[in-house]
Image: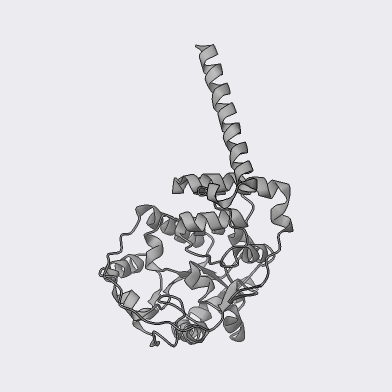
């Protein structure tokens, strides 16, 4: 029996080693046609590599923005700075709450925000998180948290990419990689924001659909809120404006509203309050262009000021003096 167990262990160990080496060789040298189950995306869309490197050198801010591309393309730190607030945007493309959880574990203590503005795009509660997981494990050194997040996605492409990314980190490729601040239509702005060249949307009719909330994402979201609560960070939930046709295509959007309100936190759905033009203020059916960003941020700051959220932030300053 002991010999059988030993042989089984040796076989599994050898098989695992061969698999890992194979993934690395394919990832490094094989043509793209052979990499369908590997997606190493360092420096890809969204400037996440630059954002995460900047986050490591940022501390003691007033406001931390969390969320998907609606966060890093929707909350402009320059506008908040004009109103006297330091901020950082930790959003990423299709960032689900599983990835938000990992980023909070890695960066919350250092950033040490007084307030978190948590962007809650309904679709993010319905996804598997694979796209954002691939993005993060490619653009930041990996640890046990990366492994646990990868296991949550239960996806072979994620596992393979994690293996290749760990190898790349070990060789020093991550440290030596420099991402340009201007890529195609995107310009990275210090503080985690990405400004896109002005484009205008062509509205179209969207088919009606149901939002099917993932229990895994909802639980991760609630863990994130609890984590922030334990750190005595004020949290404000914000649904950024999207095209009216897209917003109205969700037949059960009010159910989502009920879930947000049940968190017992300030929740603002700007689709119900701000008046924007679906063509002039958007670059596509759910992202604001820079004209829309300025109007949205102005309205957000005005709303938070009206509801005394900034007074509470200033009160925190007084308590720490």
Tell me if residue 105 can be seen. Answer: no
Question: 41 or 192, which is in the foreground?
Answer: 41
Relative side of 125 to 197, left or right? left
- Looking at the picture, how far across and down is residue 215, in whole percent? 35, 53
**As drawn, 219 above or below 121:** above
**As drawn, 135 above or below 188:** above
Q: Quadrant of the C terminus?
A: bottom right
Relative side of 299 to 136, left or right? left
Question: 48 or 37, which is in the foreground?
Answer: 37
Residue at left 60%, top 60%?
107
Total residue callouts: 0
Q: Quadrant of residue 57?
A: bottom right
| Colouring style | one colour
Question: 307 or 19, which is in the foreground?
Answer: 19
Tell me if residue 42 can be seen. Answer: yes
Question: 49 or 29, which is in the foreground?
Answer: 29
- Looking at the picture, how far across and down is residue 55, in whole percent? 64, 65
Q: Quadrant of residue 182?
A: bottom right
Residue at left 55%, top 17%?
7
- Looking at the picture, how far across and down is residue 190, in whole percent? 65, 74
- Looking at the picture, how far across and down is residue 261, in whole percent? 34, 69
């Amino acid at each position: 029996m002991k010999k059988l167990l030993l042989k089984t262990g040796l076989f599994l160990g050898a098989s695992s080693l061969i698999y890992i080496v194979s993934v690395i060789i394919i990832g490094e040298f094989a043509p793209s046609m052979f990499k369908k189950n590997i997606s190493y995306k360092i420096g890809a869309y969204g400037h996440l590599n630059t954002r995460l490197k900047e986050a490591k050198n940022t501390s003691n801010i007033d406001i931390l923005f969390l969320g998907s591309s609606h966060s890093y393309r929707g909350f402009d730190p320059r506008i908040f700075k004009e109103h006297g607030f330091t901020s950082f945007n930790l959003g990423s493309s299709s960032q689900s709450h599983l990835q938000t959880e990992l980023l909070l574990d890695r960066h919350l203590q250092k950033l040490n925000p007084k307030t978190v503005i948590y962007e809650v795009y309904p679709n993010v509660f319905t996804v598997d998180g694979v796209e954002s997981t691939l993005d993060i494990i490619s653009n930041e050194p990996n640890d046990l948290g990366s492994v646990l997040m990868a296991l949550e996605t239960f996806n072979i492409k994620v596992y393979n990419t994690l293996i290749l990314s760990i190898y790349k980190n070990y060789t020093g490729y991550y440290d030596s990689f420099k991402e340009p601040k201007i890529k195609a239509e995107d310009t990275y702005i210090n503080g985690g924001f990405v400004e896109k060249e002005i484009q205008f949307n062509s509205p179209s009719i969207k088919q009606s659909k149901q939002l099917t909330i993932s229990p895994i994402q909802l639980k991760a979201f609630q863990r994130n809120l609890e984590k922030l609560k334990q750190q005595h960070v004020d949290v404000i939930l914000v649904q950024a404006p999207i095209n009216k046709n897209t917003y109205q295509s969700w037949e059960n959007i009010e159910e989502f509203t009920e879930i947000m309100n049940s968190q017992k936190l300030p929740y603002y759905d700007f689709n119900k309050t701000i008046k924007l033009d679906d063509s002039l203020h958007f670059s596509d059916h759910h992202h604001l262009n820079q004209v829309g960003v300025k109007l949205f941020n102005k309205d957000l700051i005005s709303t938070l000021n009206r509801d005394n959220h900034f007074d509470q932030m200033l009160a925190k300053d007084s308590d720490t003096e």
